[in-house]
Structures are given as C-alpha cells and as structure tokens.
Amino acid sequence: MKLYNAKRIIPGLIIFLGLITLPLWYNMGKAAPAPQPKIDTVAIQRLAQKQCVLPKEQMRTEHMQMLNDWRTQAVRNGKRIYVAFDGKQYEMSLQNECMKCHSNKSQFCDTCHTYAGLKTDSTPYCWTCHIPPKESK
Amino acid sequence: MKSSRRDFLKIGGACALGLGALPAVSALAKNELPNFISGQDAVTGKKWGMVVDMKKCLEKGKPGCKDCMLACHKIHNVPEIDDPQDQIKWIWTEKHGAVFPGDEHAYAPHEANEKPTIVMCNHCTKPVCVRVCPTKATWKRPEDGIVMMDFHRCIGCRYCMAGCPYGARSFNFRDPRPHIKTELNPEFPTRDRGVVEKCNFCYERLAKGLLPACVESCKVGALAFGDLEDPKSEVRKLLAAHHTIQRKPELGTQPNVYYIV
C-alpha cells in the first residue's frame, strides 16, 4: 500500500492531533485539588457520638438516593420518622434534620458538588425551595 | 442434546417449584426493621374538615382582622405580590356574592353580597384538581383526605388551576423569594418559579400534633378544624347545631370546608 502525499498528510495528522488534544495539554498539571470540606460544625462537635444516619462511606455514595427516599416517604407516604441502622430515630427533613447538624451548606454541600461539576442551584436544585441555615462568614 | 419427555417434565417441575418458593423467600429476606414510621405525636383523622363561622368572624372579630391569613402566610413562606395576576393565595377573603354565587339575588341588601368571606382550599372529597393532574403532583391522601401538593413533582401545567372551581390554587409566575415580606420560616420550604401552590391544611403541623395555623391564630374561634368522620369532633358538633352551607355544592366536588353565614 502506498500513501500518496505523505509529506503533507503526516504533518497534517500530527497538527490535527495536537490541536484536538490541546485542552489536555493546556490543563496539564492544573488539576483542581480534591476538596477537603470542613464538616465539623458546632452542632456536630457537641455530639457525644459523631454518627450520621448511615456510616460515612455509605452516606458519601448513597445520600442522593436516600434524600430521594426520604422525600417520597415524608411527602407522599406521610411517614416522617426514619429508624437508622443503630435504632436511633430521625425526622426525615432536609431543613429540619440534615441541616441542623450540617449547618454549613457552603462547605458541606457546595465544595464537593462544585468540584464534581454540578452547578449551584441547578443540579441538584434543592436550594431554590429549601432554605439553608444562615452561615456566619 | 436429546431429552426425553421424562427429563423435560422433571426440569419443568423443578422450575415451577422454584417459582412457587419465590414469595416465601422474598418474605423471609425482608428487612425486619421498619425503616420509615409515622411520628408518635401526630394527630390523625379519617377526614379532616373545617367550619368557618363568618358570623363570629365579622361580629366578634376586630374590623379588618387578618390574623388567620398573616399566620398562614408567615408559616408557609407565602410571598406577597400586589399584581393580582401573580398573587399567591392560601387563605384570603372574597365577597360573599362571589363565594356563594347562588346565594345572591337582586333584592338582597347590597352589604350582604359585599361582606368578606374567608376562603381557602376546600380539600374536596372528589377533587377536580387531582383528577386532572398529569403527574400526580397533587393527590388526595387516602388516610385523612387532605389534598396534597408535591412541589417536587409539579411541572407547572396549571391544569389543576383550570379544574378547581374555587380558584384555590396559585401559580408562581415569578421567583417568590424576593416577594416574601415576612422573615423566612426556616422550618418550611419556599416554592420555586413554575409550580402551583395552595392551602395544605397544615399537614406538616398535624404531623407534629398542632392545629392548622389559621385555626390557632383566630382569637374569636371563628375557624374550627376536626375530623368529619368523628361524631364527637368540634366540627361535627358545629355542623349539627347550625345551618351550614358549602361552596358550589351543585358541582359535586363535595367540599370539606363548611360555612356558617
């Protein structure tokens, strides 16, 4: 097989590859550091046993499904109390339960959501209706 | 592979046995802990209803009193918008003649048709809004008859508003947050632009054992709330003792808010 016009095609291909991978070169070494959200609020420091409704690892990966389930149970099924794995009872309410401990939305919610490329107030759009606690800055 | 009729029947039988055991297995595998329960201090009723005593309200209440409306709108973060097109209303007043269109005639005193009447969602036994909602964002709670609203699911089509013969529903044409004049109640959400809202009979307060905010705030006791299925409830006593009327009963929606006029 013979490649015609190799003199032009091969440099052309190299330039093309260079151009489409430009964003990768441009951002090389500039990776945003993984967020280290400060999650110890005053309310959490006061807790004798620092334990959320599920173990930490599970909360990290499953909180979205859990919030969905809580919403369904509280609003649609009228069941407002959640019995955790350790038998403790929680009110299934974002404003009246979750945010009572995690009162620092900008740290607790936003740092990771922003890092993951979720736009504030559009995905997930919790806070267009739900009211986050006031934060002192 | 060759299989005899005998082998085929054996495999078929085993499969049937497996399928038959499925319900038993799933019942055994079920989590024993009930994860989601109702609160202990919730007040429960089979069919919530209200009696609005307009005689008491107008005779005993101070003129122009708006306690019930202010209490409701403060607790539920209801915005205050002057433009009547965009107004959000949970509980408000309407002229008697407009609330009870069959109750006016040409020779009635002018004031009779003009006097204010408190109106809100009637939590109908046969709610039109629920029938027309395409997403089940509004539905009737089977346990206590409250016509609920799930703002998460509302797509803002406003069929319910067209369906409701009482004008009890309001649409958020704009972001309501800048129009909330009272301090935000951090225990209740606001709404977003593009959803429909209305009175919810304070289901979130009932879940904590409290009466609806309007009933609690009325100083002359013109609003009574209770279980219509319970003959000993306050509403049933009032209904037994007074002549009461409903709004537009001829439409067959069977409203659960009654009026003493």
Image (tube, coloured by chain):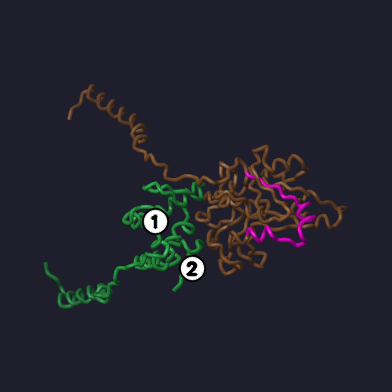
Amino acid at pointer 1? Met
Q: Which image quadrant: the N terminus of chain B? A: top left
Residue drawn where x is 15% and y is 75% of the image? A6
Q: In this view, does B118 lie above or below A114?
A: above
* Residue with the mark numbered 1: A64
Instruction: Rate crowding at label 1 as few (under 14), some (14 to 19) or many (20 or more) other CA atoms within 10 Å.
Output: few
Residue B52 inside the magenta-drawn segment: yes
Name the chain letter of the residue that bears numbered label 1: A
Can you say whether B66 is above or below A135 in the image? above
Q: Which chain carries label 2?
A: A
Please name the residue shown 78% across and 52% down the image.
B55
Q: Where is residue B27 in the image (x, y as percent from the top left)?
A: 37, 35
Q: Is residue B219 left or right of residue B206?
A: right
Query: Same chain for marks 1 and 2?
Result: yes
The picture's colour for chain A is: green
Check disc 2 and report its element: helix, strand or loop.
loop
Q: What residue type is labelled 2?
A: Lys
Q: Residues within 10 Å of mark 2 (few under 14, many from 20)?
A: few
Res. A134 mark: 2
Asked whether A120 falls inside the magenta stretch, the response is no
What's drawn in magenta, residue-wise? B48-72
The single residue placed furthest to the left in the displayed view is A1
The hue of chain B in the figure is brown
The kind of secondary structure element at disc 1 is: helix
User: Which residue is farthest top?
Assistant: B6
Residue B44: horizontal and vertical position, in percent? 58, 43
**In the image: residue A48, left or right of residue B217:** left
